[in-house]
């Protein structure tokens, strides 16, 4: 399913990313989170279909204020996020912003995001050790957690096309925490 691009609106000192369609919006972002071109901002439910909303071209900014919690009904053009330190029209050859796969990861790192809404599980059972901990090395295809949706457990794997191993540098969610599609789960440092 093709993602929807948020609408960028500049009004004087104020910069906002706005709803691209009428629907119900939900985000995992908070004040201080960095976003870049292609970053997943949250999900928009339009007529019972779920779409990822992503930042449009030229966006490199920080979320200025915490969005309202929960699911919020939005009309076309209604603000989703207020931004600060906005930089528009970056030169492509000078771009150092991370890709959508590494939206808040260090320059030489990458991040793994939740592909669906659900409950994140860091271990296979309550008595089992966690799949990964900070400092662990991971390889292509390795399970780093599970997301449970309606009693179905979906494995979350470390999968990047270059196949390089990495080391877990940060885990952003807790065991049995509710997560939303696009929410960053962990950051890895490429070896």
Image: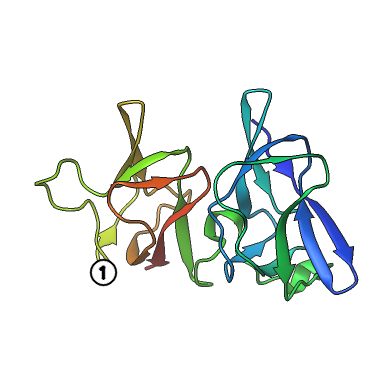
Q: Name above or below for residue 169 compared with residue 41.
A: below
Question: Which type of secondary structure does the marked residue at label 1 adopt?
Answer: loop
Mark 1, Cα crowd under 10 Å, few <14 / some 14-19 / many 20+, is: few
Image quadrant in which the C terminus is located: bottom left
Going 54% across and 72% down the picture, which residue do you hit?
107
Q: Quadrant of residue 174?
A: bottom left
Image quadrant in which the N terminus is located: top right
Going 67% across and 53% down the picture, which residue do you hit?
38
Q: Is residue 57 visible?
A: no
Residue named by callout 1: 135
- From the viewer's perspective, tell me whether residue 41 is left or right of residue 190: right
**Numbered disc total:** 1
Q: Is residue 172 visible?
A: yes
Q: Name above or below for residue 189 compared with residue 79.
A: below
Image location of residue 86, percent across then percent down: 76, 71
- From the viewer's perspective, tell me whether residue 106 is left or right of residue 135: right
Q: Name above or below for residue 166 compared with residue 3.
A: below
Image location of residue 187, percent across then percent down: 41, 63
Along the viewing direction, whichever of 72 and 164 lies nearer the viewer: 72
Along the viewing direction, whichever of 9 and 89 lies nearer the viewer: 9
* Residue ranking furthest to the left: 127
Image location of residue 84, percent across then percent down: 72, 73
Q: Quadrant of residue 67?
A: bottom right
- From the viewer's perspective, tell me whether residue 183 is left or right of residue 169: right
Going 32% across and 65% down the picture, which residue do you hit?
167
- From the viewer's perspective, tell me whether residue 98 is left or right of residue 59: left
Image location of residue 50, percent across then percent down: 61, 31
Going 54% across and 65% down the picture, which residue do you hit?
104
* Residue ranking furthest to the right: 12
Q: Quadrant of residue 125?
A: top left
């Amino acid at each position: 399913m093709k993602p929807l691009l948020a609408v960028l609106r500049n009004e004087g000192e104020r910069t906002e990313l706005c709803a691209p369609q009428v629907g119900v919006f939900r985000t995992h972002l908070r004040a201080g989170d960095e976003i870049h071109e292609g970053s997943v901002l949250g999900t928009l439910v339009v007529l019972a279909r779920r779409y990822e909303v992503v930042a449009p071209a030229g966006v490199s900014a920080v979320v200025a204020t915490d969005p309202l919690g929960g699911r919020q009904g939005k009309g076309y053009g209604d603000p989703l996020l207020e931004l600060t330190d906005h930089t528009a029209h970056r030169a492509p050859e000078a771009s150092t912003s991370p890709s959508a796969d590494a939206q808040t990861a260090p320059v030489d790192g990458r991040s793994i995001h939740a592909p669906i809404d659900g409950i994140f599980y860091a271990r296979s059972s309550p008595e089992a050790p966690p799949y990964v901990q900070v400092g662990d090395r991971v390889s292509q295809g390795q399970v780093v957690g599970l997301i449970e949706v309606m009693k179905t457990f979906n494995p979350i794997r470390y999968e990047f096309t270059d196949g390089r191993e990495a080391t877990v540098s940060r885990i952003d969610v807790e065991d049995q925490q509710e997560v939303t599609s696009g929410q960053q789960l962990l950051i890895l440092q490429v070896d």
